[in-house]
Amino acid sequence: MISDNEKFNMQVKPNSAFLNELKSKLPEFFDREGNFDLDKFKGQLKEHNINELSDGYQLNFIGKDYARRQSGEMPSTVIVPDEEQNNGEGKDSKNLFFTGDNLEVLRHLQNNYAGKIDVIYIDPPYNTGKDGFVYPDNFEYSDEKIKDMFGIDDVQVERLKNIQGKSSHSAWLTFIYPRLKLAKILLNQNGIIFISIDSNEYNNLTEICDEIFGNTNLVGNLIIKTATDNNPSQINIEHEYMVCYAINKNNLKNWSVHSKPAQKIIEEYVKLKSKRLTVDEIQKKLRIWIKKNHKALAGVTHYNNVDDKGVYSSSSNSSNTRPGDYMYNIYHPVTGRPCPKPKNGWRWPKATFDEYELKGEVAWGPDETTQPHIKKRIETAQQYLRSVIEKDNRSTTNDLASLFEGKKIFDNPKPVDIIKDLMNFTTNSNAIVLDFFAGSSTTADAVMQLNAEDGGNRKFIMVQLPEKTYTVNSDSKEVPTKGGKAAYEAGFKSIDEISRERIRRAAAKIKADNDLTLPKDFDGSFKHYRVVNPTKQTLEDIEDFDPDNTTLFTDMVDSFSSKGLDVAGDATGEQTILTTWLAKDGYSFDANIKKIDFDGYEASLVEDSRLYIIKNGWFSENTKALLNKIGTHQITVQTIVLFGYSFNIADLRELEIGLKQLDGNINLLKRY
């Protein structure tokens, strides 16, 4: 497990992630040994002007090769399930919350969520100098190893290591680059990512996104207008940005939704129709209602006509805006006389007009002195995502505070209405939404609110680092941080605790506000996992382990339990190892798991195909029981995965021999 990943990571090169991505898209350019055939690739480019490729612009920064390498590494952490949450309020939830370093979480998700995420929204550190951002990596490799990895000299090693604990542009880019590289792999072919940023790193962010996603996949930049920031310089900055990129811009549909004001008119029309009024009576009463509520119906008040089919507008333009050739006569159906022709001709060919007339979709005036119009049905009234969005910082802060009894426990929370609008325009009802800088979990709140409104079944994945709201002074006394005092005094020791509690309280409010209309399958909870490093002692035990020993010197499984890792959640070591491996093997976190008994030893059969043997205590009688169940077709197994630290060499060889004699097609994987 951890040892296997570490061995893999030692072989990772700066271009490993790129080659893996290239191999998945262009496998024909790789030989059987996995080597890229550069000459073959160049041959495919010959018909193009290759010289143009040498003149392209590329963003370079100190730490870029290190960041590229990080995007190709496997996780060095384990996923610890919060059994209290997951078997309690989150038992039936499909939503996920991860507490831990988001780079490690993204690495874990590469196998079971690759190509499955619909929308990513993140609000990373802006690197303003005031937001507390410093580069977190401590460069665990020796100077000699770093020089060998990247082909650099002593001076360059020093420059690279100098970004540790710094907030320079290079430090920020080294931090964000691998996270965006891994995020891209998680998005499906219709996927998009929104990234909030301000002017400090805006240019660097767009350049690095151009490199990762391709500048042709820039969807656009939203301007988020905010309250004045009281900048003491000459220009007060009253906006920030939201950068949007797609995996493939050509796959995107128009981002539009049915107009909410239009929906209100439809609802009023349905009420009037239920009273069995005539069409003329409905139209008269509807127009009075629209006039009375015109402020709430801004943009759709012209939908005030009614016929047997419903509500429509007759205000569409009948004439061409430029000279055209549709100059035929249109005769009024009552007077029989021709209506006046527009100066530039009609907007439609005669065949189109005749088709609409036959369907009853032409609105006529009282006589031939007025021009006819094609009816525009209210169902077609759409709203589109605006490029400039207003954001009220005060109301956003107050909205969050209201969930926590008026306490301002989180500075500058994301605006839930803006995130909800983004999701409304860009997701379908079954979308998966990821936010790996969760903060106060505004994105989760927005997803739940939208599901409550339209009956959707969107799912969220939140990731938040357990940043502490306190420090420990020289007297071993906890002291609240500058921005964490209110949260600490409210009982929250870390940001992720606030984040999870926000989801609970927001869900409770949504249920209270939508009691009668809430969908039956509304998901207002989450499953929780902690992504943590093994203890120093465990790592030492792993390093000292000798697989050829006939006896085991330690219970390695127990060191991966919640207790062994010193985290909450009540998970056993077996549950931690199994959860970590399920992600590695591409299974969802709600995979079907059955406990199978082999003469007193329980193992886990996943999706009726893969057997995981993890705990200590596997002996000859257990091997016989396993072979018997497979041989008599009581279970079907394609692959057996075992925790190498739990097996001595004799029992392992007996199992290997037995499986080969029984069924040579069963794949046996030993992990360390």
Image: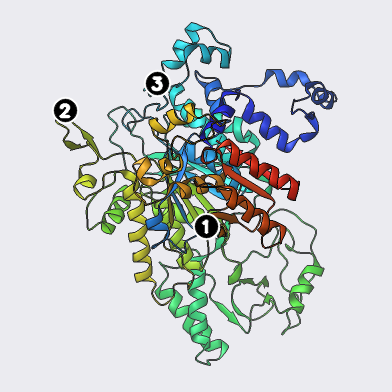
Residue 113 appears in view: no
Q: Considering depth in this image, is 545 or 584 the residue closer to the camera? A: 545
Q: CA distance from mark 1 to mark 3?
A: 52 Å
Q: Residue beneath label 3, please?
A: 164
Q: Residue beneath label 2, please?
A: 474
Name the quadrant of the C terminus. top right
The extreme bottom residue here reads 276
Residue 411 at x, y percent in the picture:
29, 43
Q: Considering depth in this image, is 346 or 23 the residue closer to the camera? A: 23
Using residue 358 as the reference point, say whether residue 158 is left or right of it. left
Q: Secondary structure at mark 2?
A: loop
Residue 620 at x, y percent in the picture:
59, 48
Q: Residue beneath label 1, please?
A: 600
The label on residue 460 is none
Say whether disc 1 or disc 2 marks the residue closer to the N-terminus.
2
Q: Residues within 10 Å of mark 3 (few under 14, many from 20)?
A: some
Q: Are marks 1 and 2 in contact (CB under 8 Å)?
A: no
Q: Indicate the amino acid at tag 3.
A: Gln
Q: Nearer the viewer, mark 1 or mark 3?
A: 1
Q: Indicate the amino acid at tag 2.
A: Ser
Q: CA distance from mark 1 to mark 2?
A: 52 Å
Asked which quadrant contains residue 24, the reply is top right
Q: Nearer the viewer, mark 2 or mark 3?
A: 2
